[in-house]
Amino acid sequence: MPLTRRDFAKRSAITGAGVALAGTVDVLATAPGALAATTSSEAEAATTARHSGKLGYGELIADPDGILALPKGFKYRIITRTGVTTLESGESTPSNHDGTATFEGLRGATLIANNHELAGARADWPHPVPLIDGLVYDSGAAGGVTIVEVAKHGGDVAEWVGVAGTATNCAGGSTPWGTWLTCEETEDKAGVKGFTKDHGYVFEVDPYDRKANRDPKPVKALGRYAHEAVVVDPKSGHLYLTEDAAGPNGLLYRWTPPAGFKHGRGKLRTLADTAGVLQAFKCFDSAGQFVDDLSRATKIGTVYGVDWVDVPDRDAKTVSIRKQFATGEVTRARKLEGVWWGDGGAYIVSSFARAESPVAHDGAVWFYDPKRRTLTLKVLLGVNPDPSVDGAFDGPDNITVSPYGGLILAEDGEGIQHLFGALGDGRTYPIARNDLNIGTADAPEYSEFTGVTFSPDGKTLFANIQVPGIMLAITGPWRRNSGC
């Protein structure tokens, strides 16, 4: 039964849902808290004020090798690097590392599914994902997924292709049954950029069974649009998917499996193209008023009720899905990026909002509670006045829940790029800084961090520097920070 605006308004009057809270909110140990005050301008000051060198693991120490600055006691290891490391088949590790997930391998090894966000014509990329026989969806596309195996205790590394011939593989998500869902962040069709097939789909990749990845098939039931990330509700079987798009802003989607369907390895690829129900979200506040864009929320603790609206044409044959809805039918948000399942719900990142949104900000994290059908603002970053100066954080993208409490976010903003943590009481702290200047001394440029995720045992934090394509394993004296 849908949660109507009237129901939510009535509930809010009784429980106070939707009332913006100052300071911390009632959240579990792994949830972030207030990173902003009551307005965007106040948020900017609060973000800076709450960042403290005494929190977390200490100040970052510049890397003499010019790769990764870390706190004292921490170290990193390069696992793969484009143009340096090679696949089992002999080609270079593909470039443009993006979303990842880790899985338990044999004999204590860690398996890592790694996206390669390569857009457009294959000929434009010197290090595309190799077209391995049987693993290719579209021979004209450069992207795909590689599987990286790291032996126990950081031993030998092997890498092979999971899927090839896909496009703009940005983020994705792991499944409860031990596979990786890789998402294409594009809407390009066959006949453009050398493509022979339509793109903008989700593909399932099995890190354990290479044979299961043969004859790649898109899961068309999940829609064709600029996919970013996906999570699976292990109880209901729903999938929640984000869209990174503008003109108009993107949407959050929910896919409900058809009656009698049971998830499992390889089951998604057996679905009919129109199986289940794909819907987009529609939010309303405690007064029952429709919310057109998530950037309207400027107070930590703001709670919106959520309804779901059926997508008319999920394959977007003539019109992009986000353009199929009239004004007032759905809620939008700029750069809906990373999403991670934890605490019984989905943490969802809106990387930033600018002129295309009602209110500007430099990053927000929301929590969707499927039981209450509510969306709560947990993290809000004010606009960073000078991203070239180390200190404040902006543009969060990939996200993971830390086994040590709080969230860890990967920056995809302007200027300096960080991995940073966010605690339940509203404080933030740096974990790493990208010291690899791919620009010049006079005009430095630093690539975004991507693919932030912990190893299954929680001892190693994996993360990528997208350009040129470097996978890093970070180890050190991890511990729970006070205030989580």
Image: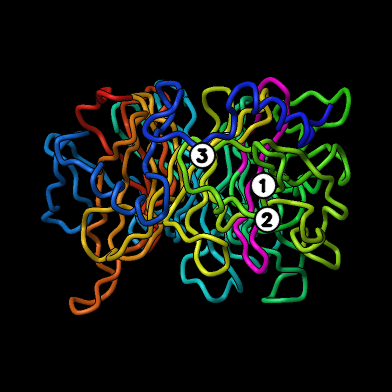
For residue 245, above or below residue 202: below
Task: Tell me the amino acid under the disc marked 1.
Answer: Leu
For residue 183, above or below residue 484: below
Q: What element carries label 2?
A: loop
The residue indicated by pointer 3 is 377
The residue indicated by pointer 1 is 252
Whether residue 301 appears in magenta in the rendering, the answer is no
The residue indicated by pointer 2 is 136
The overriding secondary structure of the stretch rendered in magenta is loop
Residue at 47% across, 33% down: 102
Determine the CA span between mark 2 and mark 3. Answer: 40 Å
Is the C-beta separation of discs 2 and 1 under 8 Å? no
Taking depth in this image into account, of 119 and 428 the one nearest to the observer is 428
Task: Tell me the amino acid under the disc marked 2.
Answer: Val
Quadrant of the image occupied by residue 379: top left
Q: Magenta segment, which residues?
A: 230-251
Residue 130 percent across, percent down from the top left: 55, 59
Nearer-N-terminus badge (3/1): 1
Taking depth in this image into account, of 363 and 105 the one nearest to the observer is 363
Q: Is mark 1 on a helix, strand or loop?
A: strand
In this view of the protein, can residue 132 be seen by the observer?
no
Nearer-N-terminus badge (2/3): 2
* Nearer to us: label 3 or label 1: 3
Task: Tell me the amino acid under the disc marked 3.
Answer: Leu
| Mark 1 surroundings: few (<14), some (14-19) or many (≥20) residues within 10 A | many
